[in-house]
Every structure is written in C-alpha cells, then in structure tokens.
Image: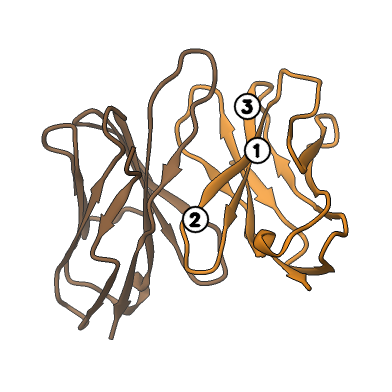
Chain colours: A orange, B brown
Amino acid sequence: AQTVTQSQPEMSVQEAETVTLSCTYDTSESNYYLFWYKQPPSRQMILVIRQEAYKQQNATENRFSVNFQKAAKSFSLKISDSQLGDTAMYFCAFNEQGAQKLVFGQGTRLTINP
Amino acid sequence: DTGVSQDPRHKITKRGQNVTFRCDPISEHNRLYWYRQTLGQGPEFLTYFQNEAQLEKSRLLSDRFSAERPKGSFSTLEIQRTEQGDSAMYLCASSYPSGRVRETQYFGPGTRLLVL
C-alpha cells in the first residue's frame, strides 16, 4: 500500500525566512505524481505545486519549489520569503498513474510569525 | 468558475440518525471525489465518480455509507445510523481529465459532521 509520511507535525518561522517541509513516500510504482496542498485555517484546500515522477527537473511556482529525490522517495517543499498568508496546514499527497485517489500525509502545521 | 461547493457546511446530529451531504463540482468537471478528514489527519479517500458511474470505493466506505451522482453533476453522500466515529470533515473534490498531464483535484470547503 502507498503511504506518505510527513515527519514534522508543526513548524514556525519568522516572516521573510525560508522554510522547508519534509515528505517521504513509499511505492513500488515507477510512474506517479506528487503534490503539495495548502489548507489555511477554516478555508478550503488548494494546490500549491505538483511534480511528475518522470520529470527530473524540480517543479517551481513563484516562491514555492520542491526537492524531488526519486531514489530516496523524498519530496520536500521549500517556501522562500515566507509571508503571513502562508500560515496553514500543508499536506503532501501522492497519486499513482492510472489511479484517481490521492493518498495524503498527516500534514505539517506551518505558522509564519510577524 | 464558482468552485466546488458543499452543503451544509456544518451538521450536528444524534447517534443513529441519517445524514446527507451534497457536493456541486465545478461545471464541466466530470470526475468527483469524496474524502474524509479527521482532526489532525490528512484526508482519506472514500469514493470516486466519473460522470454518473461510481468507479472506486474505499474499504472505509462501510455499508452505512452510500454515494450517488445521478446525472453526472452534483453528488450526495449519505450516512445511515450515524456513529460517533463518523464525526469528521467530509471533503468533496472535482477534476477534469486533461490527457497525459495529471489533472488537479479542486476541493470544496467541506462539511463538518459532529455526531453526539
């Protein structure tokens, strides 16, 4: 069974700092997709960034980038120049090619302090 | 694009009662998903529809749970004989297949259920 592990339940940084959230996953498949979702307090979940496993280049979206290490089955999220609006729960998720369901990690609660 | 909507946003019920939740996906999205999220955990997959066909169900979806999407548009999730363990946030998501690129699942705000 596929599993996703986020080993940091909570993190806290100062505004404008850089923060990295960790995620590891377990699968026997070679083709799959990885996602980071953000869930602000009392608001709905939105996609932050996604990575296709067949792509060697790490995905970037403005201040958000990933470090995808396929052999290590690691998929970390780096947030640069953090902003107060980045405060949220962050979930790492995994999706096999050909499957529709997302498998989520337990989440990391990130707080950006002014 | 009005986003995925869910109704109600909150539901309090007594153990043993039946409850029904509704999800309206983004228009033209033909895939619809239900997830359950308990406090402090990530969402867990329950079931998935493509148009009106229910194509996958999780083992989490016991026989007290039933989901429908009768016309391939909105979906309902019913829980019969609710138990305290059913207390959770029920999330709906929708997507539109985009060929080789893995499509994004867009989530609704969720329905928070509390069973007393």
The answer to whether B24 appears left or right of A3 in the picture is left
Circle 1 packing at 10 Å, graded few (<14), some (14-19), many (20+), is: many
Residue A114 percent coordinates (x, y): 78, 73
The answer to whether B28 appears left or right of B90 in the picture is left
Of the image marks 3 and 1, the number of the one nearer the N terminus = 3
Q: SS for tag 3?
A: strand
Quarter of the image for residue B17 reads: bottom left
Check disc 2 and report the residue beneath it. B43
Residue A66 percent coordinates (x, y): 78, 38
Q: Are marks 2 and 1 in contact (CB under 8 Å)?
A: no
Circle 2 packing at 10 Å, graded few (<14), some (14-19), many (20+), is: many
Check disc 3 and report the residue beneath it. A32
Q: SS for tag 1?
A: strand
* Chain ID of residue with mark 2: B
Amino acid type, label 1: Ile
Amino acid type, label 3: Tyr
Check disc 1 and report the residue beneath it. A49
Q: Residue at x 56, y 62 (%)?
A: A40
* Chain ID of residue with mark 1: A
Number of numbered discs visible in the structure rendering:
3
Residue A98 percent coordinates (x, y): 49, 22
Q: What's the distance in space between the residues labelled 3 and 1, CA to CA? A: 15 Å
Task: Indicate whether A25 appears above or below A111.
Answer: above
Residue A17 percent coordinates (x, y): 88, 59
